[in-house]
Amino acid sequence: MTVADWLAALDRRAALRAKAGLTRRLRARAAGDAVVDLAGNDYLGLATHPEVTAAAARALSAYGLGATGSRLVRGSTDVHHALEDALADWLGADRALVFSSGYLANLAAVRALVRPRTLLVSDAHNHASLIDGCRISGAETVVTPHADVAAVAAALAAAPGRPAVVVTESVFSVDGDLAPLARLHAVAREHGALLLVDDAHALGVTGPSGAGGVAAAGLAGQPDVVVTATLSKALGGAGGVVAGPAEFVRHVIETGRTFIFDTALPPAVAAGVHAAVGLARAGDDLRAELADRAALAVRRLGAAGLAVSAPDGAVVSVTTPGPEAATAWAADCRDRGVAVGCFRPPSTPDSRSRLRLTIGAGVPRADFERALETIVACAP
Ligand SMILES: Cc1ncc(COP(=O)(O)O)c(C=O)c1O
């Protein structure tokens, strides 16, 4: 095949995506743009909090721009350790380990939980990083219907005597609903299986002092539960975390390829996120505001006849007639100064396209309410 053939084949595939309404384009974003943000994940408005940026700035001048290597090769800074101690304490876990992204944390966590003959039981709505974690682990994976505890129990019962891990999100990233974590844990324990929970959209948003969905379900610190999360959503930064029994975290440090072979989280980001943890823990008023806004969004959009999800966190999804309608709807909103997420396959677990609204307490209340009116006005 010539280079020209190869490029032509890529063009044909782009044309097929365009025909299916699945084109993805980068758009410019200016610093401090005036758009009302219902697309980002800065749930508590901490990305720009002065205490967070000041902590990051101090570490930036102390350590420089990047970590300059993996922590095993280059050394592990006090900033990383302080962040990990703070996260473990908040999550009620024995020990925590940070990664340069939540995606990489999930890849490492799934793989580290797999032993010979392990069965992975993965929820159909799980995030791409968990799906890829299951694939990369090489373990047999059964995908169970969304939030279906009976199906999980049946999958475990069909593999007696085998090590097994139940893999789920807590607040799901697409529809914002909460997994039945306590029941999943009970079923997992009954069958001697472990439970892996990605708390990405719940950390800082739900649970006591914002400690997330696992803590809310009373499962913090359970020895058969491993928690992962991204530090890029309610904590406003970047990076990921794996938290669980100390023996497990030690195993990840010594064997986790996405920990060992990846340049560490920049110290400046670790310091900023550490400051954000303190603010998030103390942010009950922000969480109350988020819950109030999510309920308002459901009421307003529902009253306009739109098909809205029932959110347990700060993610609200609105079903659209198809991918083209989703793209046009999101573009119209953007033209009127409101940024919303436009979720189409393969970013959705089924064939339904959605507008995804991520509610942030940092958006002024009046702007948020006007944004809801804009979304209704632009509906197809
Ligand atoms: C549920 C979930 N897990 C993991 C990730 C990945 O986290 P990160 O962006 O830090 O790689 C995301 C999205 O960003 C997510 O929504």
Image (spheres, rainbow, N blue to C red):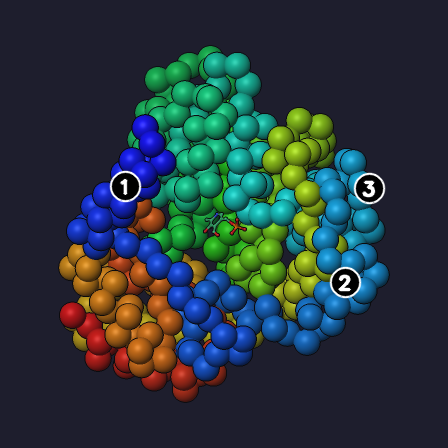
Of marks 1 and 3, which one's residue comes earlier in the chain? 1
Residue 311 appears in the picture as rendered? no
Element at label 2: helix
Residue 15 percent location from the top left of the image: 22, 49
Q: How many marks?
A: 3
Element at label 3: loop
Disc 1 target residue? 8
Q: Nearer the viewer, residue 366 or 299?
A: 366
> Residue 75 — which label?
3
Residue 333 percent location from the top left of the image: 29, 75
Task: Kindly tell me whether mark 2's CB lies below 8 Å from ligand 1.
Answer: no
> What residue lies at 43% left-to-right and 73% top-to-bottom?
37
Residue 116 appears in the picture as rendered? yes
Quarter of the image with the C terminus in it: bottom left
Task: Kindly tell me whether mark 1's CB lies below 8 Å from ligand 1.
Answer: no
> What residue lies at 46% left-to-right and 82% top-to-bottom?
34
Distance from Cα at disc 1 to Cα at disc 3: 47 Å
Q: Could you tell me the amino acid type at mark 1?
A: Ala
Residue 46 percent location from the top left of the image: 60, 69
Of marks 1 and 2, which one's residue comes earlier in the chain? 1
Distance from Cα at disc 1 to Cα at disc 2: 45 Å
Element at label 1: helix
Disc 2 target residue? 60
Residue 275 percent location from the top left of the image: 71, 64
Quadrant housing residue 167: top left
- Cβ–Cβ below 8 Å for labels 3 and 2? no
Q: Nearer the viewer, residue 200 or 185?
A: 200
Q: Could you tell me the amino acid type at mark 2?
A: Leu
Distance from Cα at disc 3 to Cα at disc 2: 17 Å
> What residue lies at 45% left-to-right and 30% top-to-bottom?
134
- Say few, some or many: other residues with alpha carbon within 10 Å of mark 3 (under 14 / 14 to 19 / 20 or more): few
